[in-house]
Every structure is written in C-alpha cells, then in structure tokens.
C-alpha cells in the first residue's frame, strides 16, 4: 500500500525527465506533453532561461520571509502591474490561495468603505476556483463539497451567461462577482466576451467588485497575456497562478489600488508567498512571454492546432463532437467517454488532461512548434480510430 493519501486517480505512469514538449519515463519512453502539468509548464520542460534563473537564485538566496523587502517580488509585482489593469500584487504559492486572497480582498474593500455587510460573492455553475474550504464553496460543486461539513458561507451560485440572473442575485450583501473567462476544469467553455463586458457594467452600476479567475487562462495561454483582453473588459481583482511559474509553485492576486485599499499591514500574509526562488522563476517566465512575437506564436500555433483538430473531429464524429477553446487552451468535447480517448492517447504517447462535460483538454506548452502539433494530431487520429474500433 502506498504511503500517499489516495486523493488522486493517477495514471500508471511516472516521468523522470523533461525537455521542451517531451517527457521521458525511467525506461526512456518519450511522451508528447500536451497537458503541460495542467497548463503549468507554459515554457515546456527544462527551459534554459528558467533553469538558469532558478539555479542562480538557488546559489544566492532561498528565503527571507515577508518580514523584509524582497527585490524580486518588487520587480515581478511592478512588471505584472505594468502589463495589466492592476496597480498592486499579492504573491501566493498556489491558485487557490490567489483566489482566497481575491475573496478576502473584496470583502475587506467593502468593510473599509463602510459596507461591512457586503461579504457575499456571486459565482457561476461549472466554476472551479480551488480546493480550500472557501474556494470549494465558491466552485459550488457537490463532488468537491461532499463530506467536508458545513459549506463556507458567502457564495451565491447562478447559471452562466444570463446577465438578468446576475442582476437578480445581487443583494445588499453582495461584495463581488467572480468568474473564469474560459472555464477550465468545467470543460473549456469560453464565456461570451459580451457577458464579461456586461458583468463589468453591472458591477460598476451596483458598486461591487469584479474578480476574474485567470489561474488557468493567464500568462499567454489563450493567445493574449490574459484572456480578458479578448473581451476588452478588465476586472478589479484577478487571480493568477499555473503558467506564472512555469512549474515552480507561485500564484498572484492582482488588483487596482482602489480594490486593494483594505489590505493594510497585518490583514493578510503568507510565509512562503513570493519567496526569492519563486520570484526569480516568475521574472524569467515574464522575460520570455513578454518578448515581442511570443504571444503571436501562441496565436499562430492555435490556428494550426484548431484546424487540424477540426479535421479529425470531422473524420471521427463518433469520438469527438466539437472543438472549443481559445489559444492553446483547447477542449475536445467527446462523444465517447473522455477517459477512453485519454487512455488511447497514452498508448500513442500523448499526454492530455480530462475536464468536466466529457472533455479532453489540449494544453501544450506555449513554446510548442508546428511539428509537435502535427505529431500530436496524427497520433490523435490513430487514437480516435482505436476508440471507434473498441466501441463497435
Ligand atoms: C487550477 C485552478 C485553480 C486552483 O489552483 P491550485 O494551484 O490548484 O490551487 C483555481 N482556479 C482555476 C481556474 C484553476 O484552473
């Protein structure tokens, strides 16, 4: 029996090495990594710039705590603010902590501005915001809440896409609305961009805050630095993580100085959040992602991938129903059980990630090249054939 708490349904695979878009097992089998550790290894594996940044920092200084200034944190905060709507950043170690900070910040804002009764957050069906007690309440999914006692109070979940339903759900106790611009775990569902703009207008009208969870969609994943740029609607607060560290655990909660005004010294904290190792890597990730041409590369790879996938979808309608998503955050809505296709892809040495709504996620590293896309799609075609054959 394993000494690990069995919370994960792990595939019977282990990797010991990675390079670019490939992962390798102990016996030298190479896999094409189109999951990127759930949209985390944004620059692929062992990217020289990240290896260099981390080893240099490791030889210099690991940890001092937030009792002191951390130069790398000031720099990464400044750069994230420069690149976005935000004025200020709080660094965390994970996505859930970034969302937790966003929720606390929204509540504190209203308390600070004379409306402490405003503490509730409106969220949407199918959402995923993390696995802490508060973020499972925000996500509202029975399978995540079941057996963990009373659900943390303060979340009102409504159907996605109906602005009148949002308006009706806003009460004198509402602090904020929280949404993923593209639902990741929920099945790669792009929220209509007009809906994000409507939420912005409604939040302004009602004096409440708008929170975007860009933990999965951020850092170039959708073909913009942040997905909300497609919509031309900015939030007051935004949670970021996954791709920001390229594999090093780091998250961030970005905000306007208006929204962050309640977060004074002593109101929130993290021992590890924003430590020098994480900041060195985060800064190195931004060096690459902000380089001219990088985001355009993501967009052109996206076009290629979507075209090829559409073809395969046409050829195997019994396996794949629809291709959806933005940039290199693509969902294959399956007709066959998604796990069947994922397993057939394992056989072809391609790694993908399941999502809700019977979806298989393609989340390749953003440094993926045309040849890798062609290779993955050829193998997908074979895998679809296998799934069809095994069903008939
Ligand atoms: C992954 C994810 C989270 C949770 O991040 P963790 O680092 O696992 O805590 C929250 N929201 C979204 C949209 C995510 O994709």
Image (tube, helix red, strand yellow):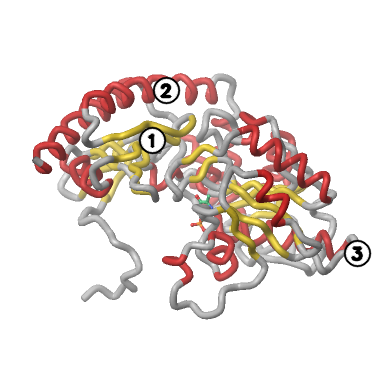
Q: Is the C-beta separation of discs 2 and 3 under 8 Å?
A: no
Query: Which badge, 2 or 3, comes first in the chain's sequence?
Result: 3
> Rounded to the nearest whole Å, what is the CA distance between mark 2 and mark 3?
49 Å
Q: Nearer the viewer, residue 230 or 78?
A: 230
Q: Say which residue appears at 20% left-offset and 44% top-offset.
A: 346
Residue 297 left/right relative to 8: right
Q: Of label 1 and label 3, which has the lower sequence position?
A: 3
Label 2 Cα crowd, 10 Å radius (few <14 / some 14-19 / many 20+): many
Task: For label 1, count other residues whose C-alpha is less than 10 Å away and answer few (under 14), some (14-19) or many (20+).
Answer: many
Give residue 137's position: percent from left, percent from top.
57, 66
Q: Secondary structure at mark 2?
A: helix
Residues under numbered marks 1 and 3 in contact, where contact means CB atoms less than 8 Å apart? no
Distance of label 1 from label 3 (alpha carbons): 46 Å
Nearest to viewer (mark 1 / mark 3): 3
**Image quarter of the N terminus:** bottom left
Residue marked by disc 1: 364
Per the rendering, the mark at residue 114 is 3
Q: The residue tagged with tag 1: helix, strand or loop?
A: loop
Frontmost of labels 2 and 3 is: 3
- Residue at (61% x, 36% y) in the render: 226
**Circle on res. 301:** 2
Q: Are marks 1 and 2 in contact (CB under 8 Å)?
A: yes
How many residues crowd around disc 3 within 10 Å: few (fewer than 14), some, or many (20 or more)? few
Q: Is residue 274 left or right of residue 5?
A: right
Camera-side residue: 86 or 75?
86
Q: Position of residue 49 (x, y in %)?
A: 49, 35
Element type where label 3 sits in the image: loop
The image quadrant that residue 330 belongs to is: top left
Give the x, y percent position of residue 84.
71, 36
Quadrant hosting residue 97: bottom right
């Amino acid at each position: 029996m394993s000494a690990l708490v069995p919370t994960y349904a792990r595939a019977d695979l282990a990797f010991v090495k990675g390079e670019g878009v490939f992962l390798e097992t102990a016996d030298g089998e190479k896999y094409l990594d189109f999951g990127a550790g759930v949209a985390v290894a944004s620059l692929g594996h062992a990217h020289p710039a990240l290896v260099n940044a981390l080893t240099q920092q490791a030889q210099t200084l690991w940890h001092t705590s937030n009792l002191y200034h951390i130069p790398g944190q000031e720099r990464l905060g400044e750069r994230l603010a420069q690149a976005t709507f935000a004025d200020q950043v709080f660094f965390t170690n994970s996505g859930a902590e970034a969302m937790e900070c966003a929720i606390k910040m929204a509540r504190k804002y209203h308390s600070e501005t004379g409306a402490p009764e405003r503490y509730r957050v409106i969220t949407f069906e199918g959402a995923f915001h993390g696995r802490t007690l508060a973020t499972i309440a925000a996500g509202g999914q029975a399978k995540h809440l079941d057996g963990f006692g009373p659900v943390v109070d303060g979340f009102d979940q409504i159907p996605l896409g109906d602005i009148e339903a949002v308006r009706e759900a806003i009460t004198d106790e509402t602090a904020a609305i929280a949404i993923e611009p593209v639902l990741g775990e929920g099945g790669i569902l792009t929220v209509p961009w007009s809906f994000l703009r409507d939420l912005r207008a409604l939040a302004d009208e009602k004096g409440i805050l708008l929170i975007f969870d860009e933990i999965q969609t951020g850092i170039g994943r959708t073909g913009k630095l942040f997905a909300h740029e497609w919509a031309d609607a900015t939030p007051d607060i935004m949670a970021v993580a996954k791709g920001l560290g390229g594999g090093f655990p780091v998250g961030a909660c970005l905000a306007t100085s208006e929204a962050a005004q309640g977060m004074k010294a002593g109101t929130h904290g993290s021992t590890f959040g924003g430590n020098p190792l994480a900041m060195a890597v985060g800064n190195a990730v931004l060096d690459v992602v902000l380089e001219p041409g990088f985001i355009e590369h993501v967009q052109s790879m996206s076009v290629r991938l979507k075209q090829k996938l559409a073809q395969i979808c046409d050829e195997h309608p019994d396996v794949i129903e629809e291709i959806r998503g933005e940039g290199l955050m693509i969902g294959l809505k399956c007709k066959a059980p998604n796990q069947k296709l994922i397993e057939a892809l394992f056989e072809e040495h391609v790694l993908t990630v399941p999502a809700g709504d019977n979806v298989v996620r393609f989340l390749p590293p953003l440094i993926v090249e045309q040849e890798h896309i062609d290779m993955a799609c050829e193998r997908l075609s074979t895998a679809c054939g296998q799934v069809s054959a095994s069903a008939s």
